[in-house]
Amino acid sequence: MSDSENRSTMDNLREELKTLRTQLEGMVKNVEEKRHELTADMAQKIAREVEYARRKATEKAHQLREAGQSGLGEVEAQVRQNPLVSLLIAFGLGWALSCLMRHLR
């Protein structure tokens, strides 16, 4: 091979290397962009799931509060209708718990 052929081959290799470097930089940039997009997508999905779970928990808490208030209203009505029976039941439960607690010591 002559000196000019060697130079031509080296110039071709340099150009190919430069092209490959440019392509590789573009690919790296593309991968970084995709990674940011995926991260943002995942963050949005997680945020939506958290918001959904928060809404469901709030709804359940509201339902429990309503059920508790309803039950409390029923107990209050029973106490108003039968105050002596309610007092005797409360006394009996207190006495039973007291005996149980003493026995467990």
Image (cartoon, grey):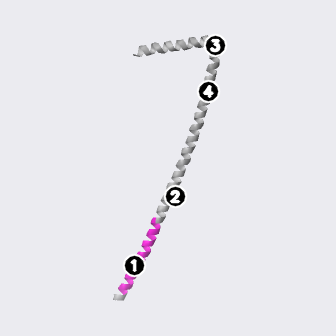
Label 3 Cα neighbours within 10 Å, binned few <14 / some 14-19 / many ≥20: few
Label 3 close to label 2 by CB (< 8 Å): no
Residue range corresponding to the magenta coloring: 5-28
Label 1 close to label 4 by CB (< 8 Å): no
Label 1 Cα neighbours within 10 Å, binned few <14 / some 14-19 / many ≥20: few
**In the image, what residue type sits under mark 2?**
Glu
Which numbered disc, 2 or 4, marks the residue that appears first in the sequence?
2
Quarter in which the N terminus is drawn: bottom left
Residue of label 2: 37
> Residue 90: x, y in percent?
55, 14
Judging depth in this view, the residue of 28 and 85 nearest the camera is 85
Label 3 close to label 1 by CB (< 8 Å): no
| Depicted 30 relative to depicted 17: above or below | above
Q: Is residue 28 left or right of residue 70?
A: left
Helix, strand or loop under label 3: loop
Label 2 close to label 4 by CB (< 8 Å): no
- What residue do we see at 47% from left, 62% from top? 31
